[in-house]
Amino acid sequence: MHMLARTDQEKISRDEDFPAWVLDQAKALRLHKPRAIDWEALADQLDDMYSQVKVDLGGDLRVILQHLLKLQFQPGDNEWKRRARGWKVSATEHRNRVCSILEDSRSLRKKLPEALARAYSGARKEAALQMDLEERALPAKCPWTTEQVIDLDFFPERAPSSNGHRR
């Protein structure tokens, strides 16, 4: 259990009151009180926060890519017409999240192409399942540029009579 001295008598546990622990850690840093800082737990927490942002970014990219794949390759006019608007709305929501993450992180902006490549393989598999297509019916590599994927106004043209192989 990670403890931090709030006063000489009172301790705050990271596990029992995380928000209060975070505030106390921030206060100790601002006041330059190194003895009040739970260094190991703080380092772990910062690592966890960075990892969570990367997970969030990857998840948002995967959702965007799934929707772009469905917009371009969904077989069946009725299904496409019925669902295209929802896919666009969801893609836009997740693009806004990605843009927000990237505005706050220069380091993640630099890693966006590799994050996109990782997200695409999962998105391709999931989109194929959702469309009842074999995965090989979809491009093996992401068919859009990084800029297109996060562009709020970009949506791919529908492939003429999607010739995807049904499962």
Image (cartoon, rainbow, N blue to C red):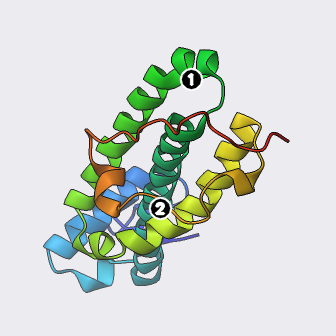
101, 18: nearer the viewer: 101
Residue found 62% across the figure and 37% down from its top: 162
Left or right, 74 with reference to 143: right
Quadrant that contains the C terminus: top right
Residue found 26% across the figure and 84% down from its top: 34
Quadrant that contains the N terminus: bottom right
Query: Can residue 1 be seen in the rendering of this structure?
Result: yes
Residue 64 image label:
none
Whether residue 129 is situated above or below residue 125 in the rendered picture:
above
| Distance in Å between CA atoms under marks 2 and 1 | 33 Å
Q: Residue 11, how many percent across, how many down? A: 43, 63
Left or right, 118 with reference to 10: right
Whether residue 87 is situated above or below residue 31 in the rendered picture:
above
Q: Disc 2 or disc 1, which is closer to the eye?
A: 1
Q: Tag 1 or tag 2, which sits nearer the N-term?
A: 2
Helix, strand or loop at label 1? It is: helix
119, 76: nearer the viewer: 76
Q: Residue furthest right?
A: 167
Q: Quadrant of residue 154?
A: top left
Q: Which residue is mark 2?
A: 52
Question: Looking at the picture, which amino acid does disc 2 mark?
Answer: Gln
Residue found 36% across the figure and 52% down from its top: 149
Residue 80 image label:
1
Helix, strand or loop at label 2? It is: helix
17, 136: nearer the viewer: 136
Crowding near the residue tagged with mark 1, few <14, some 14–19, many ≥20 C-alpha atoms within 10 Å: some
145, 112: nearer the viewer: 145
Q: Quadrant of residue 131?
A: top right
Residue found 49% across the figure and 24% down from its top: 84
Q: Residue 120, how many percent across, how many down? A: 55, 60
Question: Looking at the picture, which amino acid does disc 1 mark?
Answer: Trp
